[in-house]
């Protein structure tokens, strides 16, 4: 999970890229990078840490140009603490290409061999983004474009890239002297939206970003989602070209975007994240009613922030009071995307505080968006008890996460997942909760897809069905061994 943005304008866009990355900060806190294009010249700044810490006045002044891309990183491949793993990545031929990527490639072993033995290209990091960039560069260079590169040549290169690359990828690239290219994997697993705004003199500015809130907060109009397998090329002059570059595109957006990753004020694939989370609460309440008798719950509380919409609907459907008992320190990052179990466990108490007056003597029902490793959940149950709760019922708006996520979320090891090979009762005992209730997979799917043109979701971390069809047991074992080494 990362956040990406690309902008084509006819004025300086360094501040606009920076502002967009601030809005995407929830998608990654490990590192950030901005690249701009001024004529044929690239300017780039990337650093570890958050956006507000990474760029100084002198950095912003050096980022000249009217085309730009930006990235916030949450490491799912490569090392989280290495600055040379930060994006964007750059190659100098053909022309010069610089690229950002959100997702995770699943055939990196094969690609590494191809790049070295066949394409004669060298990658200097463990990042799959650098691989993706070099494959794109190879395929563009293989086109017989003579002295001038056209949109048709670029689309042909993306078509060849789709045939070589497996996994999830939403990417934006700058091609020196030509313009901006964006493309999405044939299953549309990771999100990417297109927007525009018209300036006073009638010229258009274009923006592509991971989430629609970036467009709205910068006064761009949402045009549409980039389609699965589609490539969009925008010239330096602002002319937009698009083409479907996949033979068999299918839309399978990641369900976890709607559960946790995306901000609630975003719309992705035509689906409101906020409305989906409200519906998750409605459906979760139906399950709760089957398992808990009337009068056994005194109060419903969310774990801030992403579970609030679901918790509000649970309280409403149960006819129970909704209260805010946990208060969040907003200067601590999202614990799920922090590297290392020890770091996550320590951060829970720094991040959340339980107010005793809301818990003392009450039977509390806690709603969280999901339970991944269980570290946070167990700490929260203990906090509720220490604050004086009589009984603690813990509920999850998502189903049990029993399988690794290989498409861009840091869940590579099944052994880290609390639900792996455990019954709900066993998980309940591990969390030390009086009762544990999960959303069902079918209810989650219905919550997200209701009244939508989207027909399918990637639910692989819940049901083990990997939509790209090329994730084998051997691959999962290799990923786990790489992750633990």
Image: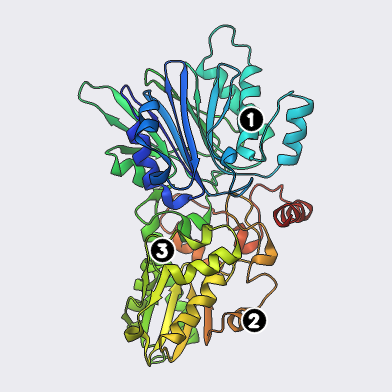
Frontmost of labels 1 and 3 is: 3
- Relative placement, left or right, of 249 versus 304 is right
Could you tell me residue 205's position as x and y percent? 32, 28
Q: Tag 1, which secondary structure?
A: helix
| Residue 343 position in % (x across, y down) | 55, 63
Asked if one can make out residue 179 in the rendered structure from this viewpoint, the answer is no
Sequence-wise first label, 1 or 3: 1
Q: Which residue in the protein does label 3 denote?
A: 306
Tell me: residue 148, above or below residue 160. above
The residue tagged with tag 2: helix, strand or loop? Answer: helix
**Contact (Cβ within 8 Å) of mark 2 with mark 1:** no
Residue 161 shows which numbered tag? 1
The local crowd at label 1, few if under 14, some if 14 to 19, many if 20 or more residues have their Cα within 10 Å, is: many
Cα separation, mark 3 vs mark 2, equals 26 Å
Whether label 1 touches label 3, CB < 8 Å: no
Alpha carbon separation for disc pair 1 and 3 = 36 Å
């Amino acid at each position: 999970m990362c956040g990406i943005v690309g902008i084509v304008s006819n004025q300086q866009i360094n501040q606009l890229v920076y502002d967009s990355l601030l809005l995407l900060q929830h998608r990654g806190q490990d590192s950030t990078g901005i690249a701009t294009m001024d004529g044929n010249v690239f300017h780039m700044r990337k650093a570890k840490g958050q956006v507000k810490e990474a760029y100084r006045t002198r950095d912003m002044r050096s980022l000249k140009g009217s085309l730009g891309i930006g990235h916030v990183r949450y490491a799912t491949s490569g090392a989280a603490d290495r600055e040379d793993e930060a994006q964007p990545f750059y190659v100098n031929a053909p022309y010069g290409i610089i690229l950002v990527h959100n997702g995770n490639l699943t055939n990196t072993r094969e690609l590494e061999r191809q790049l070295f033995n066949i394409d004669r290209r060298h990658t200097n990091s463990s990042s799959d983004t650098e691989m993706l960039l070099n494959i794109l560069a190879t395929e563009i260079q293989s086109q017989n474009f003579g002295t001038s590169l056209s949109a048709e040549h670029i689309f042909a290169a993306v078509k060849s890239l789709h045939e070589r690359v497996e996994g999830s990828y939403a990417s934006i690239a700058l091609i020196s002297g030509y313009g901006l290219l964006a493309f999405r994997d044939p299953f549309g697993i990771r999100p990417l939206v297109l927007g525009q705004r018209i300036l006073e003199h009638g010229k258009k500015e274009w923006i592509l970003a991971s989430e629609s809130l970036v467009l709205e907060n910068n006064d761009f109009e949402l045009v549409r989602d980039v389609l699965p397998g589609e490539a969009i090329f925008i010239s330096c002059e602002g002319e937009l070209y698009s083409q479907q570059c996949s033979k068999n595109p299918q839309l399978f957006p990641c369900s976890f975007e709607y559960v946790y990753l995306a901000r609630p004020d975003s719309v992705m694939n035509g689906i409101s994240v906020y409305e989906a989370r409200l519906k998750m609460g409605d459906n979760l309440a139906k399950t709760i009613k089957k398992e808990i008798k009337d009068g056994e719950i005194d109060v419903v509380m969310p774990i801030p922030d992403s579970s609030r919409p679901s918790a509000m609907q649970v309280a409403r459907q149960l006819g129970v009071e909704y209260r805010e008992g946990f208060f969040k320190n907003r200067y601590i990052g999202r614990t799920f995307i922090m590297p290392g179990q020890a770091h996550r466990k320590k951060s829970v108490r720094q991040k959340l505080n339980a107010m005793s007056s809301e818990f003392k003597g009450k039977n509390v029902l806690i709603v969280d968006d999901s339970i991944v490793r269980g570290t946070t959940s167990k700490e929260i149950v203990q906090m509720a008890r220490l604050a004086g709760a009589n009984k603690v019922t813990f509920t999850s708006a998502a189903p049990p996460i029993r399988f690794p996520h290989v498409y861009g979320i840091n869940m590579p090891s099944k052994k880290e997942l609390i639900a792996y090979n455990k019954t709900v009762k066993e998980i309940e005992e591990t969390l030390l909760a009086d009762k544990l209730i999960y959303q069902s997979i079918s209810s989650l799917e219905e919550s997200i897809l209701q009244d939508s043109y989207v027909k399918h979701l990637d639910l692989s971390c819940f049901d083990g069905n990997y939509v790209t069809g090329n994730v084998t047991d051997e691959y999962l074992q290799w990923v786990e061994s790489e992750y633990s080494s």
